[in-house]
Image (tube, rainbow, N blue to C red):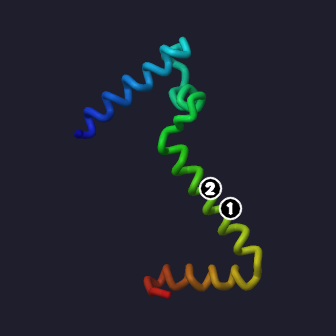
Amino acid sequence: MNSKKIEAIEVVYQGFFKSLFRVRKTTSTSIVLAEFGKFPIEHFAWGYVLLYYNRVNMVTKNRILGKAWEAQLAMLTMKKKC
């Protein structure tokens, strides 16, 4: 399927949930989908980004792991492999 067809299906899908809840068309689609446990992929992506950031933050508090992390970042910025 091409992307235009997928987008059209997504619009109908979202409209179905809004009509099922009998909410206004101006109600956020993300809120309606969240009620059914069907979050947009963007929410999952940001969740994983925040989870990663939190783990990195916890690792850098440990002195040895923090030094290893800093060394790897330095090598990556110089475009060298570990």
53 to 40, vertically: above or below: below
Instruction: Farthest residue to the right: give it.
Output: 62
Amino acid marked by disc 2: Leu
Q: Residues within 10 Å of mark 1 (few under 14, many from 20)?
A: few
Q: Position of residue 77 (x, y in %)?
A: 49, 80
In percent of width and height, residue 71 lies at 60, 85
Label of residue 24 in the image: none
Residue toward you, 53 or 33: 33
Residue name at image x 56 percent, y 50 percent: 46
- Which quadrant does the N terminus fall into? top left
Which quadrant of the view contains residue 8?
top left
Residue 24 lies, with reference to residue 33, above or below; the image says above
- Which residue is at 62% across, 55% downward? 50
Residue 37, above or below 80: above
Q: Secondary structure at mark 1?
A: helix
Of all residues, the one furthest to the left in this rendering is 2
Give whichever of 22, 75 is nearer the camera.
22
Q: Amino acid at mark 1?
A: Asn
Residue 32: where, in percent of width, then height?
55, 26
Give me the disc on residue 50.
Answer: 2
Callout 2: SS:
helix
Q: Which residue is mark 1?
A: 54
**Real-space CA distance between mark 1 and mark 2, rounded to the nearest whole angstrom:** 6 Å
Q: What's the residue at 71%, 74% (across, down)?
A: 60
Q: How many marks?
A: 2
CB contact under 8 Å: marks 1 and 2: yes
| Of the pair 29 and 13, the residue shown nearer to us | 13
Q: Relative to residue 55, is residue 36 depicted above or below?
A: above
